């Protein structure tokens, strides 16, 4: 793997992990455009490294929130932090169940089906558009909301459905405050990312050859820095009701992908 390629992939992962444009969908589009030969043999290991980088950037951005939650949990009381943690757990369950029971079926969607990715991007565009038009509230995420948002996160495992876009849009459409929706969306994915990393590490599928360490390190730094920027930027965009810009972007890319899928 070339260092420049690793940096570019890191930037793409860092940005699209948080911006509501579907990181998995863009990676599939990239593979279709560049060809499968562009995917390095160390792709699984590199993917784990990039996911760790974006998870770390989330922790840095929300370090005060995470510390507050942990401090509240250590009080061993039914306080706001304990309730929030339980909501996070509830939101994780649908994705965990789908990931464990339908792993092979999910993998079948990642075979360069550009037409499918295009249609899913169109769905993402619709979600973002309606969420952007929702009225501002001061409502928090409830336990029931957490389950519904968790279901949307499970659906977002399909390439082309943005995880952040689906979870934030679902929360906002349920009447949750936009800033609180973004906060919940980004915090709820941290345990899932680390769970996925642990699963990959213990699966025995990862190969540590000691080669391309510099390139992978560069990709890690690029993903981490891009993640910091994208995560912070996304919070402000949601607060200022700017999701429509991403809706237009997903609409355009979705239409192009669908057309490319039919022509190709």
Image (cartoon, grey):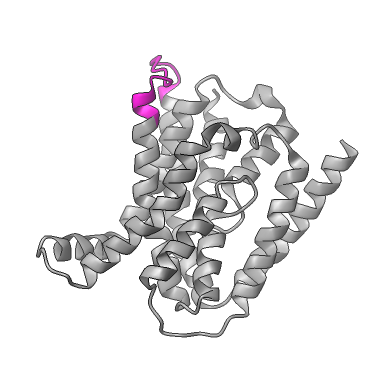
**Residue 73 pos. (x, y %):** 16, 62
**Residue 41 pos. (x, y %):** 54, 19
**Residue 92 pos. (x, y %):** 39, 53
Residue that protrudes farthest toward the right in the picture: 263
Q: Quadrant of residue 205?
A: top left
Seen in the picture, residue 126 relative to 163 is either above or below; the reply is: below
- Choose between 117 and 249: the one closer to the eye: 117
Going by the image, does 99 lie left or right of 187? right
Q: Magenta residues?
A: 200-213
Seen in the picture, residue 163 relative to 40 is either above or below; the reply is: below
Going by the image, does 255 lie left or right of 137? right
- Choose between 261 and 13: the one closer to the eye: 261
Going by the image, does 55 lie left or right of 151? left
Q: Quadrant of residue 104?
A: top right
Magenta includes 208? yes
Magenta stretch prevailing secondary structure: loop
- Residue at 40 percent across and 23 percent down: it is 213
Q: Which quarter shows the N terminus?
A: top right
- Residue at 67 percent across and 21 percent down: it is 37
- Choose between 221 and 103: the one closer to the eye: 103
């Amino acid at each position: 793997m070339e260092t420049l390629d690793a940096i570019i992939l890191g930037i793409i992962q860092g940005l699209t992990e948080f911006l509501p444009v579907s990181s998995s969908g863009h990676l599939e589009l990239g593979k279709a455009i560049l060809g499968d030969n562009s995917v390095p043999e160390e792709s699984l290991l590199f993917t784990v490294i990039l996911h760790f980088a974006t998870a770390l950037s989330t922790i840095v951005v929300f370090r005060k929130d995470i510390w507050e939650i942990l401090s509240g949990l250590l009080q061993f009381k039914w306080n706001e932090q304990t309730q929030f943690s339980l909501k996070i757990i509830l939101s994780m369950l649908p994705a965990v169940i789908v990931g464990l029971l339908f792993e092979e079926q999910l993998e079948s969607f990642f075979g360069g089906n550009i037409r499918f990715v295009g249609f899913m991007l169109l769905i993402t565009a619709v979600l973002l558009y309606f969420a952007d038009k929702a009225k501002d509230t001061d409502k928090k995420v409830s336990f029931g909301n957490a389950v519904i948002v968790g279901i949307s996160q499970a659906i977002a495992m399909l390439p082309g459905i943005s995880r952040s876009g689906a979870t934030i849009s679902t929360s906002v459409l349920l009447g949750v405050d936009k800033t609180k929706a973004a906060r919940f969306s980004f915090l709820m994915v941290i345990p899932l990312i680390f769970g996925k990393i642990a699963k990959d590490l213990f699966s025995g599928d990862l190969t540590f050859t000691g080669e391309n360490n510099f390139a992978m390190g560069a990709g890690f730094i690029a993903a981490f820095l891009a993640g910091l920027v994208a995560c912070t930027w996304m919070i402000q965009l949601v607060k200022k009701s700017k999701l429509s810009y991403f809706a237009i972007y997903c609409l355009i890319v979705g239409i192009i992908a669908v057309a490319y899928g039919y022509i190709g």
